[in-house]
Amino acid sequence: MNRLRLFLLLRQQNSLSLRRSPAFEQSVVAKVMMMFGAGFMIIYMLFIGTMLGLPASESHEYGFLLALMPLWMLIDFSSRFAVQQTPAMVVKPYLLQPIPFKAVVETYLVNSLLTGYNFIWLSLLLPYAFVVFCGGASFCQILMIIICGELLFMANSLIYLMVRTLIGRSLLWWILPIVLYGSFWVSLAIDEDLFDDQLDVLCSAVMAWWFPLIVLALLAGSFALNRWMQCRFVLEEVMRMEKGEKAMKSVTQFQFLNAFGQTGEYLKLELKSMMRNKAIRSRVVMSFCLIVVLTLLISYTPVYDSATMLNFWCFYCFGLYGMTALVKVMGPEGNYIDLLMTQKENILSLLLAKYYIHVVILFVPFILMLPAVIVGKFSLLMMVSYMLLSSGLLYFMLFQLAVYNKQTLPLNQKLTGKGNMENGIQLVIQMVAMFLPLVLMSAFVLLFNETTAYLILAAIGLLLTVTHPLWIRNIYQRMMQRKYENLEGFHASR
């Protein structure tokens, strides 16, 4: 009974912490867009579940949806980076409270199992179960499909927590999800017939009487392992904080940036933030890893061979890091925004330094995508035009968020989906920045031809790149007009 009361109390406090967040009441638009996205996802999965149920009913292979569970679990795992926190991030405040530490960890693990996001996948399971039931499946069979499917998604949430915690300690742990979710597709890479045989075996296995026992064992095992891991790692981190971090053996000075004066000092600050702060470093590493994966897929597989997809991914590879980092521009600086306000035009120099860093980063995807040029997937003109468009039009739009962002981003907090969207302007600008270049490209191709379209896009990007001192100064002036409102938001969200 005490554990139940503790669970209900902590669940209530978690809900209150979200409502007390300074970002909770800041934008109705962001909430409406998120609800719209969730509704669209549910409708899409209802359609997929129904469509998969039709062939499964005709062939009487009622376990077809569960046989494809590695695919759904991969999608589920990837999406959780935007919506789920690790228990370690929310357990720490309770370490000094007179309640059992392990009980708090267990409570948050149970809470992660009962979160509403896990039950969204019922929109995939229920229509599939209804269709196969109409096609001849027994009530026990459809009940097993629904229960086992939902329990697998719950187990997947615990697997995500383990992997996310381990990745925070070493990036080598990325091997674990790659092996776990990638092994299912090895047979497809070898031979399609072998993959079909694998699906047939899985369709039979998931409907066997012993399959629910395996699912329960997986759920119980992942819960027990998570409990042990979270307790150990949280305590280790607290003990390390009490003893103090080890002194750094050396400090990188970046002496070559001294020639750029005050802007050079902020360039050093940006580089050191990427190297030392968990929140910023996580975004850099994840963005670069995704760019590498996308360039390899584009260069060496026929997955994205259509003209539309090649244009989208070429631009996306250049714009991905900016879309990830600049949507929270000035968020990290909210921790010391008062110091930046002490001297005139400090923030102007900081914005210029941010712009130069992001322009230099564009050369990374340019180099990584050269193999795609060699194999003929991209043209050099196409890459140059999208690179200039990113440094010009894309950054011009994303840097506007510096005027409106007023929520502090903790420097040593790992990447999490909580509080990523503080106002509707962020969402609108990010969506426009992602799709406007492709809309312009399509319009120019209809009016002229592909080569002329790339030249026009390159000219637009070059114009905004060359005139960056003008529009960055305009952003700075508008920030100063809103400085007291922004300062209040930064202070409240620390």
Image: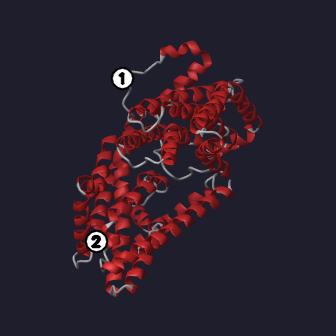
Q: Position of residue 77 (x, y in %)?
A: 39, 57
Question: Residue 387: which numbered mark, if any?
Answer: none
Which quadrant is the C terminus positioned in? top right
For label 1, the residue is 249
Quarter of the image holding residue 247? top left
Which quadrant is the N terminus positioned in? bottom left
Q: Report the side of 217 relative to 337 (left or right).
A: left
Which of marks 2 and 1 precedes in the sequence? 2
Residue 330 or residue 145, whichever sits in front:
145
Report crowding for label 2: few under 14, some 14 to 19, many 20 or more residues within 10 A (C-alpha).
Answer: some
Report crowding for label 1: few under 14, some 14 to 19, many 20 or more residues within 10 A (C-alpha).
Answer: few
Q: Report the side of 152 relative to 454 (left or right).
A: left
Q: Position of residue 401 (x, y in %)?
A: 66, 41
Vertical placement of residue 116 versus 359, above or below: below
The answer to the question of whether label 1 and label 2 lie on touching residues, with beta carbons closer than 8 A, is: no
Q: Residue at x 75, y 31 (%)?
A: 477
Quarter of the image holding residue 296? top left
Colouring of the image: secondary structure
Is any atom of residue 54 visible in this view?
A: yes
Residue 304 or residue 131, whichever sits in front:
304
Is any atom of residue 491 visible in this view?
A: no
For label 2, the residue is 216
Q: Residue at x 53, y 66 (%)?
A: 12
- The residue tagged with tag 1: helix, strand or loop? loop
Q: Position of residue 484 (x, y in %)?
A: 74, 39
Identify the residue at the far top of this view. 259
Vertical placement of residue 283 versus 35, above or below: above
Q: Residue at x 47, y 68 (%)?
A: 45
Amino acid at dot 2 = Leu
Amino acid at dot 1 = Lys
